[in-house]
Amino acid sequence: MYRPYAHARYEFFFMRLLFAWVVLYSTDPMLPSFVKFEEPLSGSQQTLSKVFPGIVDSADKNPGIYRYKSTPEPTGMAHFLPGITVLSNPTVAFWTQIILVAAVVLYISGFVLPIALLVITFIHCAIFTLNNSMGATHHGYQIISITLLAQTVVFWLPWGYRLFKKRLELPEGIRLQDWAIYYSQLVIATCYIIAAVSKLLASGVMWIVKSPLIAVQIHKSFDQKYYEYLDPKWLEEGPKYADFAVNNPNLTRLILGGGLVLEAVAFLVLRSRLWALMIGVSLIVMHRIIGHTMALHFPTNEQVDLVFLVNLPFWIVFAYAWVTKRRMENPLATG
Protein backbone atom coordinates (compact mmCIF):
# COMPACT_ATOMS: atom_id res chain seq x y z
CA MET A 1 0.00 0.00 0.00
CA TYR A 2 1.33 3.43 -1.01
CA ARG A 3 4.47 1.96 -2.55
CA PRO A 4 5.74 2.09 -6.14
CA TYR A 5 4.63 -0.81 -8.32
CA ALA A 6 6.13 -2.15 -11.53
CA HIS A 7 5.13 -0.78 -14.93
CA ALA A 8 5.57 -2.26 -18.38
CA ARG A 9 7.99 -0.65 -20.82
CA TYR A 10 5.17 0.50 -23.10
CA GLU A 11 3.69 2.41 -20.15
CA PHE A 12 6.95 4.32 -19.65
CA PHE A 13 7.07 5.15 -23.34
CA PHE A 14 3.50 6.39 -23.65
CA MET A 15 3.72 8.40 -20.43
CA ARG A 16 6.87 10.11 -21.71
CA LEU A 17 5.33 10.66 -25.14
CA LEU A 18 2.07 12.12 -23.84
CA PHE A 19 3.73 14.18 -21.12
CA ALA A 20 6.15 15.58 -23.70
CA TRP A 21 3.15 16.78 -25.70
CA VAL A 22 1.72 18.40 -22.55
CA VAL A 23 5.01 20.24 -21.95
CA LEU A 24 5.23 21.52 -25.53
CA TYR A 25 1.57 22.47 -25.59
CA SER A 26 1.90 24.45 -22.36
CA THR A 27 4.85 26.46 -23.70
CA ASP A 28 3.25 27.07 -27.10
CA PRO A 29 1.83 30.54 -26.26
CA MET A 30 5.15 31.58 -24.71
CA LEU A 31 7.87 30.53 -27.15
CA PRO A 32 8.21 31.06 -30.92
CA SER A 33 7.47 28.14 -33.19
CA PHE A 34 10.46 27.12 -35.28
CA VAL A 35 8.19 26.04 -38.13
CA LYS A 36 5.89 28.80 -39.38
CA PHE A 37 3.37 28.87 -42.21
CA GLU A 38 1.92 31.85 -44.01
CA GLU A 39 -1.85 32.22 -43.88
CA PRO A 40 -3.97 30.60 -45.12
CA LEU A 41 -2.74 27.12 -44.18
CA SER A 42 -3.29 24.25 -46.55
CA GLY A 43 -5.34 21.24 -45.47
CA SER A 44 -2.28 19.16 -44.59
CA GLN A 45 -0.70 22.06 -42.73
CA GLN A 46 -3.89 22.58 -40.72
CA THR A 47 -3.86 18.91 -39.79
CA LEU A 48 -0.20 19.12 -38.77
CA SER A 49 -0.94 22.24 -36.73
CA LYS A 50 -3.66 20.39 -34.82
CA VAL A 51 -1.49 17.33 -34.18
CA PHE A 52 1.58 19.32 -33.10
CA PRO A 53 0.22 22.62 -31.72
CA GLY A 54 3.41 23.26 -29.76
CA ILE A 55 5.56 23.24 -32.91
CA VAL A 56 3.51 24.34 -35.89
CA ASP A 57 1.64 27.61 -35.77
CA SER A 58 0.37 30.58 -37.71
CA ALA A 59 2.94 33.09 -38.89
CA ASP A 60 1.20 36.05 -37.26
CA LYS A 61 1.34 34.71 -33.73
CA ASN A 62 3.43 36.76 -31.31
CA PRO A 63 5.01 34.71 -28.51
CA GLY A 64 3.99 35.99 -25.09
CA ILE A 65 7.53 35.86 -23.78
CA TYR A 66 8.57 38.76 -26.05
CA ARG A 67 6.62 41.11 -23.78
CA TYR A 68 8.59 40.34 -20.64
CA LYS A 69 11.46 42.81 -20.66
CA SER A 70 11.65 43.14 -16.85
CA THR A 71 10.48 41.44 -13.63
CA PRO A 72 8.56 44.08 -11.66
CA GLU A 73 7.32 41.48 -9.15
CA PRO A 74 10.02 38.75 -9.12
CA THR A 75 9.00 35.29 -7.94
CA GLY A 76 10.92 32.06 -7.52
CA MET A 77 14.19 31.82 -9.40
CA ALA A 78 13.75 35.39 -10.65
CA HIS A 79 15.08 36.47 -7.22
CA PHE A 80 18.51 34.97 -7.85
CA LEU A 81 18.49 34.97 -11.66
CA PRO A 82 17.82 38.62 -12.61
CA GLY A 83 19.12 37.85 -16.11
CA ILE A 84 16.13 35.58 -16.72
CA THR A 85 14.61 38.36 -18.84
CA VAL A 86 17.11 37.44 -21.57
CA LEU A 87 14.50 34.85 -22.59
CA SER A 88 12.41 37.69 -24.03
CA ASN A 89 15.06 38.34 -26.65
CA PRO A 90 13.68 36.91 -29.95
CA THR A 91 16.94 35.12 -30.79
CA VAL A 92 17.28 33.62 -27.31
CA ALA A 93 13.60 32.63 -27.31
CA PHE A 94 14.01 30.91 -30.68
CA TRP A 95 17.02 28.88 -29.54
CA THR A 96 15.32 28.12 -26.26
CA GLN A 97 12.52 26.50 -28.25
CA ILE A 98 15.04 24.51 -30.30
CA ILE A 99 16.81 23.28 -27.15
CA LEU A 100 13.50 22.45 -25.49
CA VAL A 101 12.28 20.38 -28.45
CA ALA A 102 15.64 18.57 -28.67
CA ALA A 103 15.49 17.73 -24.96
CA VAL A 104 11.90 16.57 -25.34
CA VAL A 105 12.90 14.22 -28.16
CA LEU A 106 15.60 12.73 -25.90
CA TYR A 107 13.05 12.42 -23.11
CA ILE A 108 10.61 10.54 -25.35
CA SER A 109 13.36 8.23 -26.58
CA GLY A 110 14.46 7.47 -23.01
CA PHE A 111 18.10 8.42 -23.65
CA VAL A 112 20.12 10.46 -21.12
CA LEU A 113 16.98 11.11 -19.10
CA PRO A 114 18.80 12.95 -16.27
CA ILE A 115 20.19 15.54 -18.72
CA ALA A 116 17.00 15.78 -20.81
CA LEU A 117 14.81 16.26 -17.74
CA LEU A 118 17.15 18.82 -16.21
CA VAL A 119 17.02 20.93 -19.38
CA ILE A 120 13.24 20.62 -19.83
CA THR A 121 12.57 21.40 -16.16
CA PHE A 122 14.82 24.45 -16.11
CA ILE A 123 13.33 25.91 -19.29
CA HIS A 124 9.74 25.26 -18.21
CA CYS A 125 10.29 26.73 -14.74
CA ALA A 126 12.19 29.72 -16.15
CA ILE A 127 9.49 30.56 -18.70
CA PHE A 128 6.65 30.52 -16.21
CA THR A 129 8.71 32.16 -13.47
CA LEU A 130 9.13 35.05 -15.88
CA ASN A 131 5.41 34.94 -16.59
CA ASN A 132 4.62 35.05 -12.86
CA SER A 133 7.03 37.93 -12.23
CA MET A 134 4.81 40.44 -13.99
CA GLY A 135 2.67 41.15 -10.92
CA ALA A 136 -0.18 38.72 -11.63
CA THR A 137 0.74 35.18 -10.58
CA HIS A 138 -0.82 32.27 -12.43
CA HIS A 139 -0.72 28.71 -11.11
CA GLY A 140 -2.20 26.97 -14.11
CA TYR A 141 1.12 25.45 -15.18
CA GLN A 142 2.72 24.62 -11.83
CA ILE A 143 1.48 21.03 -11.91
CA ILE A 144 3.63 20.44 -15.01
CA SER A 145 6.70 22.12 -13.54
CA ILE A 146 6.64 20.21 -10.26
CA THR A 147 6.00 16.90 -12.04
CA LEU A 148 9.06 17.59 -14.18
CA LEU A 149 11.01 18.54 -11.05
CA ALA A 150 9.99 15.32 -9.28
CA GLN A 151 11.14 13.19 -12.21
CA THR A 152 14.40 15.12 -12.46
CA VAL A 153 15.19 14.52 -8.79
CA VAL A 154 14.44 10.80 -9.12
CA PHE A 155 16.69 10.31 -12.15
CA TRP A 156 19.53 12.25 -10.53
CA LEU A 157 19.31 10.25 -7.28
CA PRO A 158 21.77 7.52 -8.40
CA TRP A 159 24.32 10.22 -9.25
CA GLY A 160 23.75 11.84 -5.87
CA TYR A 161 24.40 8.53 -4.15
CA ARG A 162 27.56 8.00 -6.18
CA LEU A 163 28.79 11.40 -5.06
CA PHE A 164 28.81 10.04 -1.51
CA LYS A 165 30.23 6.71 -2.70
CA LYS A 166 26.98 4.87 -2.09
CA ARG A 167 24.59 2.94 -4.27
CA LEU A 168 20.87 3.55 -4.56
CA GLU A 169 19.07 0.35 -3.59
CA LEU A 170 15.61 -0.17 -5.09
CA PRO A 171 13.02 -2.75 -4.00
CA GLU A 172 13.08 -5.97 -5.99
CA GLY A 173 11.23 -5.67 -9.28
CA ILE A 174 11.11 -1.87 -9.09
CA ARG A 175 13.07 0.28 -11.51
CA LEU A 176 13.99 3.94 -11.41
CA GLN A 177 11.21 4.67 -13.93
CA ASP A 178 8.68 3.19 -11.49
CA TRP A 179 9.89 5.59 -8.82
CA ALA A 180 9.61 8.47 -11.29
CA ILE A 181 5.96 7.60 -11.99
CA TYR A 182 5.23 7.15 -8.29
CA TYR A 183 6.64 10.56 -7.38
CA SER A 184 4.90 12.14 -10.35
CA GLN A 185 1.62 10.84 -8.95
CA LEU A 186 2.65 12.02 -5.48
CA VAL A 187 3.25 15.63 -6.51
CA ILE A 188 0.06 15.67 -8.61
CA ALA A 189 -1.92 14.51 -5.56
CA THR A 190 -0.09 17.06 -3.41
CA CYS A 191 -1.25 19.89 -5.71
CA TYR A 192 -4.86 18.96 -5.05
CA ILE A 193 -4.38 18.38 -1.32
CA ILE A 194 -2.71 21.79 -0.93
CA ALA A 195 -5.64 23.37 -2.78
CA ALA A 196 -8.11 21.70 -0.40
CA VAL A 197 -6.12 22.58 2.73
CA SER A 198 -5.67 26.21 1.68
CA LYS A 199 -9.43 26.56 1.23
CA LEU A 200 -10.14 25.05 4.64
CA LEU A 201 -7.49 27.18 6.33
CA ALA A 202 -8.94 30.31 4.75
CA SER A 203 -12.61 29.74 5.57
CA GLY A 204 -13.07 26.31 7.17
CA VAL A 205 -16.29 24.51 6.28
CA MET A 206 -17.82 27.93 5.60
CA TRP A 207 -15.91 27.82 2.30
CA ILE A 208 -18.59 25.46 1.00
CA VAL A 209 -21.41 27.59 2.35
CA LYS A 210 -19.96 30.75 0.80
CA SER A 211 -18.92 29.10 -2.47
CA PRO A 212 -21.64 30.87 -4.55
CA LEU A 213 -19.70 34.08 -3.87
CA ILE A 214 -17.24 32.76 -6.44
CA ALA A 215 -19.38 34.78 -8.86
CA VAL A 216 -17.34 37.83 -7.81
CA GLN A 217 -14.08 36.09 -8.74
CA ILE A 218 -15.56 35.00 -12.07
CA HIS A 219 -16.47 38.62 -12.84
CA LYS A 220 -12.96 39.75 -11.92
CA SER A 221 -11.38 37.03 -14.08
CA PHE A 222 -13.36 38.03 -17.17
CA ASP A 223 -12.70 41.73 -16.54
CA GLN A 224 -8.97 41.01 -16.37
CA LYS A 225 -9.15 39.16 -19.69
CA TYR A 226 -10.99 42.11 -21.22
CA TYR A 227 -8.33 44.60 -20.11
CA GLU A 228 -5.59 42.26 -21.34
CA TYR A 229 -7.05 41.66 -24.81
CA LEU A 230 -9.59 44.54 -25.12
CA ASP A 231 -12.06 42.09 -26.63
CA PRO A 232 -15.72 42.89 -25.69
CA LYS A 233 -16.65 39.21 -25.72
CA TRP A 234 -15.04 38.80 -22.27
CA LEU A 235 -17.41 41.43 -20.82
CA GLU A 236 -20.35 39.67 -22.44
CA GLU A 237 -19.49 36.15 -21.31
CA GLY A 238 -18.50 36.99 -17.73
CA PRO A 239 -22.01 37.72 -16.38
CA LYS A 240 -23.34 34.50 -17.93
CA TYR A 241 -21.05 32.29 -15.86
CA ALA A 242 -21.28 34.47 -12.74
CA ASP A 243 -25.07 34.39 -12.90
CA PHE A 244 -25.01 30.58 -12.83
CA ALA A 245 -23.32 30.62 -9.41
CA VAL A 246 -25.73 33.26 -8.09
CA ASN A 247 -28.91 31.66 -9.48
CA ASN A 248 -27.94 28.11 -8.51
CA PRO A 249 -26.34 28.47 -5.06
CA ASN A 250 -27.02 24.93 -3.84
CA LEU A 251 -25.81 23.35 -7.07
CA THR A 252 -22.68 25.52 -6.85
CA ARG A 253 -22.10 24.33 -3.28
CA LEU A 254 -22.57 20.72 -4.41
CA ILE A 255 -20.12 21.05 -7.30
CA LEU A 256 -17.43 22.97 -5.42
CA GLY A 257 -17.98 21.08 -2.16
CA GLY A 258 -17.67 17.76 -3.95
CA GLY A 259 -14.54 19.02 -5.63
CA LEU A 260 -13.09 19.99 -2.25
CA VAL A 261 -13.65 16.47 -0.89
CA LEU A 262 -12.14 14.95 -4.01
CA GLU A 263 -9.06 17.17 -3.71
CA ALA A 264 -8.67 16.21 -0.05
CA VAL A 265 -8.58 12.45 -0.81
CA ALA A 266 -6.33 12.75 -3.86
CA PHE A 267 -3.58 10.87 -1.98
CA LEU A 268 -5.55 7.67 -2.68
CA VAL A 269 -4.11 7.67 -6.21
CA LEU A 270 -1.00 6.11 -4.66
CA ARG A 271 -2.84 2.99 -3.49
CA SER A 272 -3.09 1.15 -6.80
CA ARG A 273 -3.71 1.49 -10.52
CA LEU A 274 -7.45 1.17 -9.97
CA TRP A 275 -7.52 3.94 -7.38
CA ALA A 276 -5.41 6.15 -9.63
CA LEU A 277 -7.87 5.50 -12.47
CA MET A 278 -10.97 6.26 -10.38
CA ILE A 279 -9.56 9.40 -8.76
CA GLY A 280 -7.99 10.54 -12.04
CA VAL A 281 -11.24 10.24 -13.99
CA SER A 282 -13.14 11.93 -11.15
CA LEU A 283 -10.71 14.87 -11.12
CA ILE A 284 -11.03 15.32 -14.88
CA VAL A 285 -14.83 15.22 -14.63
CA MET A 286 -14.65 17.76 -11.79
CA HIS A 287 -12.55 20.13 -13.90
CA ARG A 288 -14.91 19.69 -16.85
CA ILE A 289 -18.02 20.46 -14.79
CA ILE A 290 -16.46 23.52 -13.15
CA GLY A 291 -15.15 24.71 -16.51
CA HIS A 292 -18.54 24.29 -18.19
CA THR A 293 -20.57 25.95 -15.44
CA MET A 294 -18.17 28.60 -14.11
CA ALA A 295 -15.53 29.06 -16.84
CA LEU A 296 -12.74 28.10 -14.44
CA HIS A 297 -10.58 25.95 -16.70
CA PHE A 298 -7.50 23.95 -15.74
CA PRO A 299 -6.62 22.07 -18.95
CA THR A 300 -3.04 21.32 -17.87
CA ASN A 301 -4.32 19.59 -14.73
CA GLU A 302 -6.65 17.48 -16.85
CA GLN A 303 -3.83 16.56 -19.22
CA VAL A 304 -1.41 15.56 -16.45
CA ASP A 305 -4.16 13.59 -14.67
CA LEU A 306 -4.89 11.75 -17.91
CA VAL A 307 -1.24 10.83 -18.45
CA PHE A 308 -0.13 9.74 -14.97
CA LEU A 309 -3.34 8.82 -13.15
CA VAL A 310 -5.74 7.47 -15.77
CA ASN A 311 -2.93 5.83 -17.80
CA LEU A 312 -5.14 4.80 -20.74
CA PRO A 313 -2.52 2.66 -22.57
CA PHE A 314 -2.37 0.25 -19.62
CA TRP A 315 -6.15 -0.13 -19.37
CA ILE A 316 -6.50 -0.63 -23.13
CA VAL A 317 -3.91 -3.43 -23.02
CA PHE A 318 -5.51 -4.81 -19.85
CA ALA A 319 -8.98 -4.89 -21.43
CA TYR A 320 -7.64 -6.53 -24.60
CA ALA A 321 -5.79 -9.21 -22.55
CA TRP A 322 -8.88 -9.84 -20.42
CA VAL A 323 -11.16 -10.27 -23.46
CA THR A 324 -8.61 -12.52 -25.17
CA LYS A 325 -8.29 -14.68 -22.06
CA ARG A 326 -12.05 -15.04 -21.75
CA ARG A 327 -12.29 -16.13 -25.38
CA MET A 328 -9.56 -18.71 -24.92
CA GLU A 329 -11.20 -20.08 -21.76
CA ASN A 330 -14.64 -20.28 -23.40
CA PRO A 331 -14.21 -20.45 -27.21
CA LEU A 332 -17.80 -21.67 -27.73
CA ALA A 333 -19.17 -18.45 -26.23
CA THR A 334 -17.88 -16.49 -29.21
CA GLY A 335 -19.41 -18.79 -31.74
Image (spheres, rainbow, N blue to C red):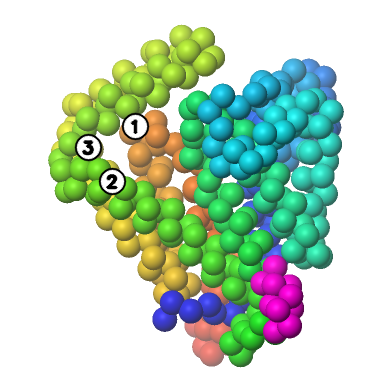
Residue 229 lies within the magenta run: no
The residue carrying pointer 2 sits among few (fewer than 14), some (14 to 19) or many (20 or more) residues within 10 Å by Cα, namely: some
Of residues 221 and 167, which is closer to you in this image?
167
Question: Which residue bears the numbered disc 1?
Answer: 294
- Residue under the point 77% across and 45% down: 100
Helix, strand or loop for disc 1: helix
Q: Tell me, for residue 211, which label it has, or none.
A: 3
Picture coordinates of residue 168, whole percent (x, y):
66, 82
The secondary structure that most of the magenta stretch takes on is: helix
Which quadrant of the figure contains the N terminus?
bottom left
Residue 191 located left or right of residue 11? left
Q: Position of residue 183 (x, y in %)?
A: 54, 67
Tell me if residue 163 is in the magenta stretch: yes
Q: CA distance from mark 3 to mark 2?
A: 10 Å
Q: Which residue is mark 2?
A: 199
Residues shaded magenta: 156-166
Callout 3 amino acid = Ser
Which amino acid does the dot numbered 1 rest on?
Answer: Met
Confirm whether residue 259 shows in the render. no
Q: Position of residue 172 (x, y in %)?
A: 61, 90
